Structures are given as structure tokens and as C-alpha cells.
Amino acid sequence: MRGTAIWTAAAVGAALLTVLGPASEASGATTLVVATDGSDSAPGTVDRPLRSIQRAVDLAKPGDVISVRGGRYALTDNITITASGTASQPITLGAHQGERVIVDGEQLPASHTPVGGSIPRAERGAIHMEASHWRISGLELVNGPYGVYCDGCNNNVFSRLSTHDNYESGFQLQGSSSNNQILNLDSYGNRDPRKNGESADGLAVKEGSGTGNVVRGARLWNNVDDGFDAWKFASPIVIENTVAYGNGFNRWNFPDFAGDGNGFKMGGGTPAPAAGHTLRNTVAFRNAAHGVTDNGNPGALALTRNTTWANAGTGFDADVPGGTATLTANLSVADARPAAVGSGTVVGGNSWNLGGTWNAASVLSTDPGAITGARSADGSLPSAPSFLVPHNGAAVGARF
């Protein structure tokens, strides 16, 4: 994996699984093994592993591989990554041969920031990252002040991560950050008691800029705020083959609840930057607010072949004054209303343009069991060939 080339999720997953074995002598790379029963004074071999992921991160050089054995790693300080790999020699961090690795931030002081408090920047994230040219895969990040927090990050690949039950967003990318790939992420149950649910999203690419960022194959569900949030991110993001559902409900009984509950929030800010994000082949269902919303972003959004279903608000909300969004071949099924579009919005071939009634009887299946089930062996989304597919064969909406 070199440079900034776009790899498929399957290819990245397969490559990472391959490199998380012994390093090739020809490559000159070192494999640093970490295990719960290791020692940070050990050399980091399979027989004599390191104890902490942080120690391996501190030792890693461009081209090295950090291979983490299965188990629960309870943090007392967050994992901080500030040294970068290179385009030809990225640094790899991942689970050893597919073993289950849980990085637990429950003991981090910032995980328990009081109501109204703020998290110091350096303490954000079970993994706090300000580095480039990393490949991070196969880790489960829980109970942290954010799962992954990446600020000023470029040319990284994050693959097959699970970020859940964190005390802020599961994964947040911000600042000056370009050419990052977030592939096959599962992010769910994230909440923020300190803000009564105002800001913990499944995945946030926000408050920054940088071209070439891609989200593919993510599932973002039951988060307290939004599934995906692009608040104040000024450069185009591509989001595709992604599912967002069940977001914005007060499952934690927060007082003065402030969660928004959109499936995909495609911008925002005061003023909102005009960013031409792309959303294609996605599904947003049973969210507390809108399925997809421009949230005030007047940029040239491109929304193509997406499906919304049973959202409490509007399926496709793109009515910001002066907005220049284009909505093509999208499907709204049984949302509170299918669409709200402004005078500058270009629409064509969407379900509400085709006419007729679009409800549960209009599609082959409304059972989400297939799309929410176990991922494929390569980490890709499971097949769901009937889910929210029109009975009449109309070429609208997502296909999985």
C-alpha cells in the first residue's frame, strides 16, 4: 500500500492481514509484537512481546509493523501517535492474525469529564493521532474520550475498526487532513454525558479541510447525536456504501437531551462552508431526525442512489437558501416526508419525482437483518439484495 492510491476495502483488509505476520527480511521492516502478558523492556518478538501498544508506537519506524495479540488493553493514558511513516513505508498497527483486540479507555480521566466540561486536546481519543502514512486495522476501541481522534492526519488507511460505547464520537477526523480512507468502520452506541448528547457521532469528519478523504463500507448506528457529521469541514468528502440508523435517541436518559439524530449530516456551521460532498449508495433509516440533511451547507452536494426509510424527519433535506445540491435517483420510503428541496437544488429521477406511493409495500423487504448482520470475511458489508429495493424495478435507491 503506497502513496495515496484508492484501494478497495477488501484489498486493504487482505493486505493488512498479510502484513501482520513476520516482517520480510528483504523489506528491512521490524515486526513489534504486543501482548497483555508482555513487558515493555522486552524486544517485542513473538516469544518476548511488549506489554503496551504505546511502547510499540514509540519504537516504530517507517515500514514497521505493530502486531497486537488478542486481549483487553486497559489504558491509563491514551495511545498517542505523532511520528509518521512515509508514502513508500507506512507504519502498520493492527490485530495479530485476526485476534480480538479491545482497547479500553474507561480508566482515562477524560472519559469522565463532567457536564459542561471540556476535554483537553491532547487527551482526546483512546487513540490520539497527529501523524500520516499509517495503516490501522482490526482494533476495537471502547469507553474512550473519542475512540479515534485524528487531527492533522494525511494519507492514512483505517480499516475494519470498531468504535463503540465511547464518551464522545467513535471516530473523529479534523483539522488539516487529506487523503485518508476510513473503510469498513462499525461505530455505535457512542454518547457524550458532558454535553447531554449534543456532539457524539458515529463518525465525524469536521472542523477542518483537506481533499481526498473517503468513507466506504461504514455502519453508524445508535449514536446519541448523528451517524455521520461533516460540520464545518470545508473540502469535499466522498461517503459511499454506508449505512446510518437509529441515531439521535436518548437511550442514556440524559437530562436536557440535545442529540440531533440525523443519519448523514452533510455540513453546517455559522456560516456553513460551501463544500461539495458526495453521498452515494447509502441507506439511512429510523433516525430521530432526517435521513440526509445539508444542514445549511450551500455547496454542490451530489446525492446519488441513496435510500432513506422511516426517519422521523425528512428523508432528503436540501433546502438551504442558495444551495446548489444535485439529487439523482434517490429513494424515500415512509419517511415523515420524502424531501425538502430549495430553488437552487437540481433533482431528477428521485422517487418523489416519479410519483406514486412509496411505503413498505413498495419494496421487496424492510427487514434490516441482512445489512446489520455479520460482515463478510474480508470485512465488507454483508449482502442485502432485497433490502429497500423497489418491487417495480425502478432504478432508484441503494443496492447492497
Image (tube, grey):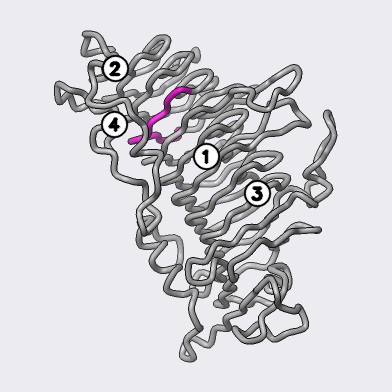
Three-letter amino acid code at the position of disc 2: Ala
Residue situated in front as seen by the camera: 336 or 150? 336
Label located before the other in sequence (1 or 4):
1
The amino acid at mark 4 is Phe
Residue at the spot 70% in from the left edge and 63% down from the top edge: 82
Q: Distance between the residues labelled 3 and 1?
A: 29 Å
Residues in magenta, as a range: 276-286
Q: Is residue 384 magenta?
A: no
Q: Mark 2 points at which residue?
A: 360
Tell me the distance, in whole angstroms, between the alpha carbons under discs 4 and 2.
11 Å
Which of disc 2 and disc 4 is earlier in sequence?
A: 2
Foreground residue among 163 and 350: 163
Q: In this view, does 123 lie to the left or right of 260?
A: right
Does 266 appear above or below 88?
above
Q: How far apart are marks 2 and 1 (CA)?
A: 37 Å
Contact (CB < 8 A) between labels 3 and 1? no
| Callout 1 touching callout 4 (CB < 8 Å) | no
Q: Which mark is residue 387?
A: 4
Residue 277 in view of the camera: yes
Q: In the image, 395: left or right of 143?
A: left
The residue under label 1 is 235
Secondary structure of the residue carrying numbered label 4: loop
Percent position of residue 237, x then y = 47, 40
Residue 169's image quarter? Answer: top right
Q: Return the disc, 2 or 3, that comes first in the chain's sequence.
A: 3
Q: Are dots 4 and 3 in contact, CB under 8 Å?
A: no
Classify mark 4: residues with Cα within 10 Å, few (<14), some (14-19) or many (20+).
many
| SS of the residue under disc 1 | loop
Residue at image position (59%, 73%) is 66
User: Where residue 230 sits in the image (x, y, percent)?
Assistant: 55, 34
Q: How crowded is mark 1: few (under 14 residues within 10 Å), some or many (20 or more)?
A: many
